[in-house]
Image: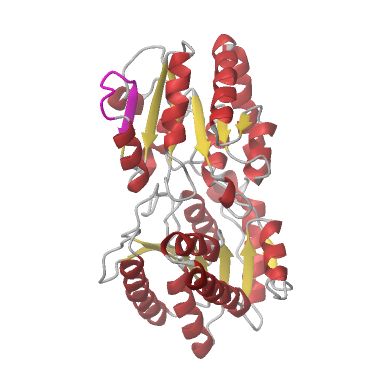
């Protein structure tokens, strides 16, 4: 099967799926946006990659303006046009659309219907929720309500129009039913992390030597997007509270955009505060960066909880480090953190204070910290095997494409064993 896996964000586990599908004999075109800033996966071919795999960055003729409503719409229209042109040129049997912004996705849906193009919506987030919150911030009540209804209809139309839908949690299926949609074309496949790429590393590694001072500081690392679903000032509060409690803490944040700018502004004037602020790091550096931390931190605001499952938590489990989450208890990722002996507290001052108490206990008992990291890694290994995950995606892809489909080829020996993208670095 000729498959276009279009992950707008360019994240790691989507690239792993493309590699696995190509290893099974499918011809895979992995498409992503070159203009969207985020933590990226390995988006170029390696010596281990099969010939059937290629990577295609798309660049629209409009700049990506994340926080400008008019600019964002102009970008999405231009991006959709570029995407449609690329799809028409490459003629895939099926398109997998993941993390594509709503207006671009709706444009693709209309074109796909006209061309009878089978496609699969890999639904990572309810875009209409975030857009509705932004409308409520910007416009008076009646306009915001009308806008919310319009974007909800648009997203419901996208779900209805997809040949198949892969949702990352049962909460999505329930939302579709609340929208009055049938769900017989919906399959739930939870997200994962690429465990052959993100492996436990030594704390003092080459990445740490380049970016962090030596010593026994308690390294608290946040790596990933800081968007409207996150309150970056929680990170500053966590650091200040830890220092006030006598912990030799250092906050490390690898991100870009408005969130890290807000954090930097909050810390202005505190010249001696132990903080390291970095841009997004290269995919090859991700395992060492995560491994350099003593504790991996994630944050999530309450209004995002039902339909946003932070994939950085899954990477943290794979990295084999204790995880601290300031997030609602009902988020599915919170259950994973607790299962790995991590900490989950509300994204409030109370949650920060409780988190510092947990950090003090962790620092006093290094063996417990090591056991928590190992528990997380074992959890990742038990759930994130790419073979069974790709089996499920293949089943959904065959449902999406009408007519008989040839079975996939047996997986080659290197794929069955799992290949390391970053050889020789595991501790």
Is residue 270 on the magenta stretch? Answer: yes
Residue 39 vertical position relative to residue 4 in the rendered view, above or below: above
State the image coordinates of residue 88 (x, y, percent, origin top left): 40, 82
- The residue positioned 66% from the left and 27% from the top of the image is 341
User: Which colouring convention does the figure follow?
Assistant: secondary structure
Q: Is residue 206 visible?
A: no
Residue 79 vertical position relative to residue 14 in the rendered view, above or below: below
- The residue positioned 33% from the left and 63% from the top of the image is 68
| Residue 311 as seen in the image, left or right of residue 267 | right
**Total of numbered circles in the picture?**
0
Q: Is residue 14 visible?
A: yes
State the image coordinates of residue 254 (x, y, percent, origin top left): 37, 37
Q: Nearer the viewer, residue 288 or 153?
A: 153
- The residue positioned 66% from the left and 36% from the top of the image is 379
Q: Nearer the viewer, residue 114 or 361?
A: 361
- The residue positioned 32% from the left and 75% from the top of the image is 78
Q: Nearer the viewer, residue 256 or 108?
A: 256
Start-end of magenta stretch:
268-277
Main secondary structure found in the magenta portion: loop
Q: Nearer the viewer, residue 75 or 68?
A: 68
Is residue 327 on the magenta stretch? Answer: no
State the image coordinates of residue 70 (x, y, percent, origin top left): 33, 70
């Amino acid at each position: 099967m000729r498959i276009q896996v279009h992950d707008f964000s360019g994240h790691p586990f989507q690239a792993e799926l493309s590699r696995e599908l190509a290893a099974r004999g499918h011809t895979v075109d992995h498409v992503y946006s070159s203009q969207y800033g985020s933590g990226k996966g390995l988006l170029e071919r390696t010596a281990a990659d099969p010939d059937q795999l290629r990577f295609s960055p798309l660049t629209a003729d409009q700049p990506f303006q994340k926080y400008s409503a008019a600019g964002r719409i102009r970008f999405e229209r231009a991006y959709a046009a570029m995407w449609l042109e690329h799809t028409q040129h490459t003629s895939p049997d099926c398109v997998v659309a993941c993390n594509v912004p709503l207006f671009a996705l709706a444009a693709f849906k209309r074109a796909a219907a006209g061309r009878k193009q089978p496609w699969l919506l890999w639904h990572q987030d309810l875009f209409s929720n975030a857009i509705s919150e932004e409308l409520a911030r910007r416009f008076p009540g009646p306009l915001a309500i009308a806008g919310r209804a319009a974007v909800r209809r648009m997203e419901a139309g996208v779900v209805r129009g997809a040949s198949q839908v892969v949702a990352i949690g049962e909460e999505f299926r329930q939302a579709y039913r609340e929208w009055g949609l049938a769900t017989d074309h919906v399959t739930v496949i939870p997200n994962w992390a690429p465990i052959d790429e993100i492996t436990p590393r030594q704390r003092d590694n080459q990445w740490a030597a380049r970016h962090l001072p030596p010593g026994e500081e308690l390294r608290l690392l946040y790596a990933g997007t800081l968007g409207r679903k996150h309150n970056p000032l929680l990170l500053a509060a966590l650091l200040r509270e830890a220092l006030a409690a006598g912990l030799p803490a250092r906050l490390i944040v690898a991100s870009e955009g408005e969130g890290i700018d807000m954090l930097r502004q909050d810390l202005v004037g505190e010249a001696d505060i132990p903080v390291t602020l970095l841009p997004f790091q290269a995919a090859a550096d991700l395992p060492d960066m995560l491994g350099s931390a003593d504790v991996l931190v994630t944050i999530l605001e309450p209004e995002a909880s039902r339909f946003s499952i932070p994939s950085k938590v899954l990477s943290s489990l794979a990295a084999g480090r204790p995880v601290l989450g300031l997030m609602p208890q009902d988020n599915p990722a919170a259950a994973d953190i607790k299962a790995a002996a991590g900490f989950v507290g509300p994204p409030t001052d109370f949650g920060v204070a409780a988190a510092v108490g947990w950090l003090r206990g962790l620092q006093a008992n290094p063996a417990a910290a090591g056991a928590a990291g190992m528990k997380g890694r074992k959890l990742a290994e038990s759930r994130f095997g790419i073979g069974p995950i790709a089996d499920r995606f293949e089943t959904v892809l065959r449902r999406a494409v009408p007519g008989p489909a040839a079975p996939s080829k047996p997986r080659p020996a290197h794929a069955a064993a799992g290949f390391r993208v970053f050889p020789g670095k595991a501790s």
